[in-house]
Amino acid sequence: MKKHLEGKHIVLGITGGIAAYKSAMLLRLLVKAGAEVQVVMTPSAKEFITPVTLSVLSGKPVVSEFFTANSGEWHSHVDLGLWADAMVIAPATACTIGKMANGVADNMLVTTYLSSKAKVFVAPAMDLDMMAHPSTTENLRRLRGYGNIIIEPAEGELASHLVGKGRMEEPEKIVDVLASYFRDKELTSPLAGKKVLVTAGPTREKIDPVRYISNYSTGKMAYAVADELASRGAEVTVVSGPVTVKAAEPSVKVVEVESGREMADACLGLFPASDIAVMCAAVADYTVANPSATKMKREGNLPPEIKLVKNPDIACLLGGMKKPGQLLVGFALETDNEVCNALDKMQRKNLDMIVLNSLRDNGAGFATDTNKVTVFTRGEESPAEFPLKSKREVAADLADMMETRV
Ligand code: C5P
């Protein structure tokens, strides 16, 4: 079951309670299960456990202040909130629970909580009387109402030798709760078990052994789609041109190719067994007719003439092979006449959905971490228009749309 935590991004929030020492164990278990963990501490948590221990265990500097002292480096709670697949606050003191319930964002932890789109797990730990106080009960009720998951405290012995619930749940149990959350998320998606082919990145068309024709595609959008679909339990294979980005989800398979021809061959092999194909790659439209086997020399006065021939249109080929029940999604990156061009492509390539992004929109297109898309679906009158979002959020919107169509 722990395998469900592999590759997951977890923000571990630690507050100033005596149980903070147990967070080191929780962190170690999460890392052991393959999660990537970013620790965020409240200032008072540092009175209980040193950030050095936590940064060594997580392999990342601990975030606590809005700025790094001296350098003034700004820590973005928004980026952290978006990076997270889940946030777990353990231990959560009455103070932090109260701040979360009321949006009192006076430290990095509560600010990150307010920026997070991910599920938040709260493991309260406090004295029995504080736990039983109507303020705390009411704050916890409100946190539940906001969709957060409260990990009920365990029974503990108090100084007065009374037994009551207030002790932070054991780290092993907290890890189990997180793992089953990710498992259930995978099982409940209609995309679970679906075979998905995603094309990614640019292609390189060789001129000679040292030169090629290519484009600015980075593969960021494609890998975000691959990660999002894999996180919903799909079996994803990315046929990828040369890129530096990597999949965060360990289950994503990558087939590396270089040219448009190689990408087409790989896709033609994989498509018949796929339920969904998402064509994100920026395939070169043309390739070099006769690439030179040796490096071309700078000879004579005239520049060399490079003869180009058409590359296969992979989306179009797959559109021609498509069987009922297969979903084919294309992208259109346009600079002008956006809607017309996108609709024309959907028709010509026999796509079921086309995702339009315009280079005219700020923050959309190549190399950015954000995108702004409009999605047209075959047979549906009006498109779905989305605002500017991170590429992973755009991928989640697309996955939501695919879920209703598989
Ligand atoms: O015609 P255009 O290149 O603008 O179409 C874009 C869509 O077609 C994208 O989904 C892209 O991945 C796909 N495509 C392809 N093979 C090509 C050219 C584009 O799969 N040779």
Image: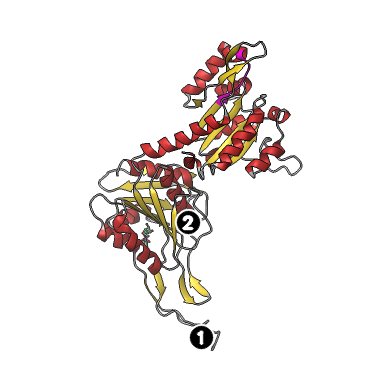
Magenta includes 125? yes
The residue under label 1 is 302
Residue stretch rendered in magenta on the structure: 123-128
Residue at point 69% right, 43% down? 73
Which badge, 2 or 1, comes first in the chain's sequence? Answer: 2
Q: Residues within 10 Å of mark 2 (few under 14, many from 20)?
A: many
Magenta includes 149? no
* Residue 176 place in picture, x, y as percent: 50, 33
Q: Disc 2, ligand 1: is the CB inside 8 Å? A: no
* Residue 398 place in picture, x, y as percent: 39, 45
Q: Tags 2 and 1 in contact by the CB under 8 Å rule?
A: no
For label 1, the SS is: loop
Residue at point 36% right, 47% down? 375
Q: Residues within 10 Å of mark 1 (few under 14, many from 20)?
A: few
Q: Quadrant of residue 24?
A: top right
Note whether residue 13 is visible. Answer: yes
Q: Name the disc covering residue 219, or none.
A: 2
For label 2, the SS is: loop
Pick the front one: 110 or 300 = 110
Taking the image as shown, residue 166 lies to the left or right of residue 318, namely right
* Residue 317 place in picture, x, y as percent: 30, 63
Q: Quadrant of residue 397?
A: top left
* Residue 368 place in picture, x, y as percent: 52, 52
Above or below for 320 versus 301: above
Above or below for 349 versus 292: above
- Amino acid carrying label 2: it is Gly
Quadrant where the C terminus is found in the figure? top left
Residue at point 52% right, 31% down? 120
- Amino acid carrying label 1: it is Leu
From this viewpoint, which residue is outermost toward the bottom?
300
Pick the front one: 225 or 76 = 225
Note whether residue 78 is visible. Answer: no
